[in-house]
Image: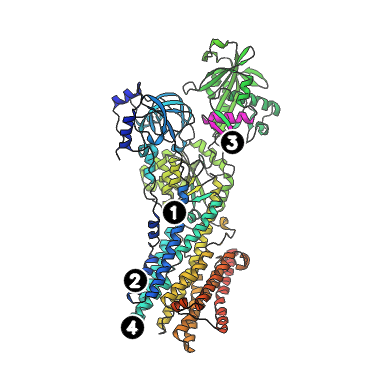
Amino acid sequence: MAEPMPLSLARRQKEDSGYMGLTSEEARRRLAMCGPNALPEPRAGSVAETFVRQFRSPLIYILLAAVLVSFLLGDVRDAVFIGVVLVANAIVGTTQEHSAGQAASALRKLEQPKANVVRDGRLVELDARLIVPGDLVALESGGRVPADMRLTAVDGLFCDESLLTGESAPVAKSPTPASVTGDEQRSYTAYAAALVTRGRARGVVSATGKNTEIGKTAIDISKAPLARSPLLIRLEGFSRLIAVVVATVVVLLIVVGIARGMPASELFMMAVGLAVSAIPEGLPIAISVALAISMRRMARKHVIVRRMPAVEALGSCTIIATDKTGTLTLNELTVTDIRLPDGTDLFCDTHADIESCHIRGKDTSPDQARERATALLRAASLPNEGSLLRGEDGWTSVGDTVDVALLAAAHKAGLPRQSIEDDYPLIGRIPYEPEIKYAASFHRDGDVVRIFVKGAAETLIAMSDRMEMNGRAVTIDRERLLRHKEEMAAQGLRVLAFAEGETTVEDDGGCGRHLLADLVFLGLAGMQDPIRPEVPDAIRNCHNAGVQVVMLTGDDPKTAAAIAADAGLAFTIDQVVTGEEVSRAEAQGQASLDALARRGRIYARIAPSQKLALALALSRNGHFVAVTGDGVNDAPALKHAHIGVAMGRKGTDVAKESADIIITDDNFASIVSAIKEGRVAYANIRKVIFMLVSTGSAELVLFLFAATLALPMPLLPVQLLWLNLVTNGIQDVALASEGPEGDELSRAPRRPNEPIFDRVMIRRLCQTTLVMGGGGIATFYLALERGYSESDARNMLLLLLVLFENFQTFASRSERKSIVALGMFGNPLLLFCIAAALGLHITAMHVPLLSDTLQVSAMKPAEWAMLLLAASSILFIMEFDKRRLRGKSTA
């Protein structure tokens, strides 16, 4: 696709003066060259590709080799049986993965944004996808910028670029001068996806689609992730361990077989059987089921998982690097503090009306303070250029975030602007401009005209000669008022001042700036983007769970520190790091940046690229990093961190496409719920792995003992596959659905370098392997000694191992808690599946086709009783080890 056509300086100057846009013919030509004004969408894999991917596993390759070998040896029945089981496993995996992909696709917005464009000399509304470089586009308050634009005409334009830069303050825009270089461009450019909060403008499109600033970010995040899921890392280590163990034991078996003089064909089949027994073939599907179950649980708690391994990854995270705006905060500027000239403070909760404000001031009665605050909010509402409307779907607002915040505060005080203007009809207005730093309105009040002014504190303090004190106007104390303003700003508040006055000017006498004299200063209002109410508890829960929280924001350090303190983050002054410090550390090398990341807790004035650099530095410091955010500026970090968490309601599509997890209610506390579910998912995966590997290890011991004792092959490959994939496969699915045990958030997260097999699991694996393997070979040996045929001895051994699996599965419900504490019926599905696995094996004993394939038959009651007694021993051994582990932890 061709790049946008460059515009020469001469052509730019021509467009900037009297330019009337493109013709339809020229626009079509440019659209053909440049392509639609849209971001590149990720390609969704087909069902066939997903199906093939299910076979890309070292655990599956050996089974495929077993199918081929069985065909070459003429054992078609075994080959077909193994092939059918593998295909069934792939179908289930494909269904799970494809369903997750479909759910992710449903999250994409299907909206068709529109834009006002000058075509053929006329202003028309077009699909924003049809915009091309060179188009003349009109912007107005409340709309979104459809493409990157050089502004040619500006009328008080302010753009909220927080989703692009992370800075919550709207950016004032100006017409583009003849030549612009470097960072100055930001003031003269409107960027795609920015929200117009105030004013109007026209501009010439300079970039569309992938060539916009947001498009460049989208291309960057389309690259392969730099960090990998903790689960995938651990499973790869586990797969390598299994491969090494299998190879070692197979070589050992071959050596023993050669020493015994075993025939090559028998030795080969025993090696294949050994490989089949050692590999937990049911593990891929069991992991998929465990993750899918947790995905559904998370969805009920407003957490959508886009990539299945991310379920467990959040439970593994040791640190959350969170965005501020829209994540910790509501991304809704709110008036929280009002300071009157005499020093009286009114502190208002985010949703409280003025009657509920807490008042601090010795010399003013509460009623008088509220009355004076009401007068201040009237002055905040009347010269306001925003609008606040209530519809069927709730409140909607248009305009600058400051104006909207003031209107909301006035409405909560019982002063909707329409009712005030009914009492004070509007006769004139001076709109806000960055150069004058105030806005004013003129209203008829009987024989006089009332003037209401809002603006920068320094500007209004200079305009006023009196201030309101206890119901009367006194000579203004400018130093005192400026001190009040500085105190409020130090708290991270955005401060605005208000004043009023009177004049006798007639309606036709004009309402100019010369009338703004002898004003009475009413006070100051402090605004902030308030912390979400649930955030402090959520951060405290993260701390209790051993998960650190650091904040990354584009705001200035003072504001960032104040908000972090309100959110409950613990930090010291030296742990507040600026973007300049990060830049210096990056220039000095990776080691310097890593050291800075170990120190920092609050990162202020951070550029988008620095968020990614810090996430990678935290990862190099040994953390599993979760990054949260909602803006385009967060997307690279969301993509390349171990786990990316995007806000679903106010987050951009780019952020959501980059993330692994989407929080649909934008509630930081939902992340804590997701951490808990992630830990439950990993615990269940460990339970399944332990159950499957202990069975496989027992089978390894069986084969090694058989080879050493010169016994026949204890189980046929098809019997091993039946044992590992069918009877085990029913039970491990139920074990993967085990619910939380209740203490998930009171434990520290797993160490990043901790393998799946820790010391406890290895010890318990040795115990169960010796019991099941030793008991199995003893049963097989004694059966042969008592005159059983090889087929009947294998039949007895296979049933014993099925029973061992039943008891082992039930005992594996918890690594620490007793089955008595969990409750016998705490997981009804597990009881059903254990019974189903046993029932399936009993059915196979009596159905001719299955009994012939598996070479099994019915057993006598006495044999059943003996095998049940032997198999139950595993339950008591597991319970004893759990009790010993609990005793050590309480000692």
The residue to which callout 3 is attached is 392
Could you tell me which quadrant the N terminus lies in? top left
Q: Are marks 2 and 3 in contact (CB under 8 Å)?
A: no
Query: Label 3 near label 4: C-beta < 8 Å?
Result: no
Q: Quick one: SS at disc 3?
A: loop
Q: Secondary structure at mark 2?
A: helix
Earlier in the chain: of badge 1 and badge 4, it is 4
Quadrant for residue 880, please give it: bottom right
Q: Residue 40: percent from the left, percent from the top?
A: 37, 43
Mark 3 or 1, closer to the camera: 3
Look at the numbered discs 3 and 1 and tell me whether their residues touch, using CB distance below 8 Å: no
Q: Residues within 10 Å of mark 3 (few under 14, many from 20)?
A: few
Mark 2 or 1: in front is 2
Q: Name the N-terminal-most of marks 2 and 1.
A: 2
Crowd class of label 1 (few under 14; some 14 to 19; many from 20; radius 10 Å): few
Which amino acid, mark 4?
A: Pro
Q: Quadrant of the C terminus?
A: bottom right
Segment colored magenta? 390-414
Mark before the other along the chain sequence, 3 or 1: 3
Q: Amino acid at mark 1?
A: Gly
